[in-house]
Image (spheres, rainbow, N blue to C red):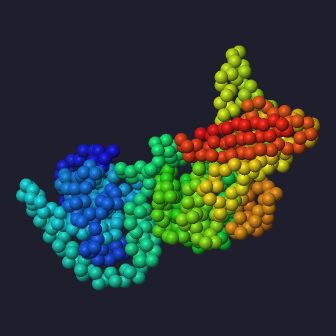
Amino acid sequence: MSAVEACGPVSVGANIPHADQVESDIEDFEDLIRDNELESASDWTADDETRPVCLFCDITFDNADAVWEHCVIDHDFDFNKLRRGLGLDFFGKIKLINYIRAQVKAGILPELNRPELFLEDSQYLKPTMQDDSLLFGIQDDDSEEEEEDPDAIYEKEQLAEVAREYAEKVKVLQSQLKDVHLQFDEYKDIVRTVLNRDFDSDTGSERSSRSSSPARHAGSSSAKGKGKHNADGDDHYFESYAYNDIHETMLKDTIRTDSYRDFIYDNKDIFKDKIVLDVGCGTGILSMFAAKAGAKKVYAVDNSDIIEKAIANIHENSLEKIIQCYRGKVEEIRLPVDKVDVIVSEWMGYALLYEAMLDSVLVARDKYLAPGGLMVPSEVRLLVAGLRDPEFMNDKVNFWNDIYGFRMSAMKPQIYDDVLIENFKPSSIVHPEPHTFRTLPLHDVKVSDLEFTSHVRIPISNQANTFDGIIDGLVIYFDNYFTRSRDEVIPEDARAETFKPGNGSLGFTTGPWGPKHTHWRSAVLLLKKPLQVPAGLEELTGTISYHKRKENPRELIIGLELMAGDSKITQSYVMR
């Protein structure tokens, strides 16, 4: 949808400003200067080397006329037609330009059919983009000859006189604004919090808003260079996190949420006065934990609509001066700092790697984590164990043998093709010692390591009274470890459900031996035919592979090869 299509009909002349509105705008403008909301009066002096930038994309031009012509052709937006239709005065045009830039920067399509959104809001008197050349020559863009009624001509002359008077006032105030530069660092922090503006930390100049634009904005795609399936998959993925129910489920998972809270609160010295990045912030809960633990600054990033609720949650808890939210993919946004001290993220999916969110976390790590910085969590391990659960098999498989007296065997095959998600008790596992088949040390692991084939061994119980020698499938789950230091070594035989070394590090498991079930549950790979384990065999051996589906890389294909004596089982499972 073009900018014009989105704005709807505009009533011509409906918003011609009255004298009291003009006077109010002048007072607001002066207040911004006195309150140090503008860097200096020199911000309104054109720099000959500054090229005007399009309102909707990052293309620059030689002059404003070229910008407006480009907007008409490429974005179906006619600035001159709109400002004439709305009867915009000097201040109205300033507000319109700053409003469009602010909305595009936030990834929101400007609602140009509702001019009250910007005309009645004095915040749009502040430049959204520093050194915005479109604002410098704004008094000169009415040079074209138009037929106007005498009242409109008189009013325009009055406005021009007001603008000239204001320009004189700016010169007078300019000398008073020298002291503003001494408070400029504090000002930048305030503006970042409110408007998500990015500044260069060395020079104090605003970074290009185009570089920090969210992934989703008018006229762009969030999946450039990717195929249609991938784009759709990404859209569905982010949309699925926009609603309350999934966040309610995760927050009510006390194993998950308590573990993050306890690690952050029990290790406040790690977070005190540090810069923290929260990747996939959701409701903002982890960001707020970090802020309460003493973080100096927290950058919360999410590409879902949930970010709007996170912002509201953060403001409701008076943490907006510490936590700054960004809408977009972490791969595409640009933070106002070069490095962060800690990256915290709850990225784990079913079977650990479903949804492929870890890829984004690792990109953020390589881009932003300072040398010696900490990943929270620090290490994750994938474990596998044999499953024997007749009750589960009756519920999921044999159920189709008799549906109100009818057989429905055609429904069974997909059960063996899909990765099933279920909770199990320890009594359903054929041996109390599961096997770790993949370890992901989050400070060092690479994105390329997330597709793999690993050797596995499945211990077999020798207790005849607890195991009848039949295996229905395999259970995959993961253990999460939070360590105080990136150099802390977790013992190979560690069990996350009991991992508390006493130094503030901790762990939790999603498997059958945890104190409570988690929302991740366990992944089940059912064998098409139950395996009768040969007598005396102490373990099964084979491989498990993880690969992303080509059609949608957020989905998983899990391959299994299993040897039981002379028997070999090969199956493939899809998680979509």
Question: From the image, which quarter does the N terminus lie in?
Answer: top left
Counting the numbered discs, the total is 0
| Residue in front for this viewpoint, 258 or 565 | 565
Tell me which corner region of the image, top left, top right, bottom left or bottom right, holds residue 140: bottom left
| Residue in front for this viewpoint, 146 or 233 | 233
Instruction: Work out which residue is located at the far top of the displayed protein and give it.
Output: 405
Question: From the image, which quarter does the C terminus lie in?
Answer: top right
476 w.r.t. 31: above or below:
above
| Residue in front for this viewpoint, 569 or 38 | 569
Q: Residue at point 37% right, 83% down?
A: 179
- Left or right, residue 500 beside residue 199: right
Give residue 359's position: percent from left, percent from top.
58, 55
Q: Residue at point 28% right, 65% down?
A: 52
| Residue in front for this viewpoint, 199 or 211 | 211
Give residue 562's position: percent from left, percent from top.
77, 40
Instruction: Work out which residue is located at the far front of the displayed protein and give it.
Output: 566
Give residue 37's position: percent from left, percent from top.
36, 72
Q: Residue at point 41% right, 49% down?
A: 221
Give residue 424's position: percent from left, percent from top.
76, 41
Work out whether residue 252 can be spotted: no
Q: Residue at point 21% right, 75% down?
A: 167
Work out whether residue 125 can be spotted: yes
- Left or right, residue 165 beside residue 297: left
30 w.r.t. 55: above or below:
below
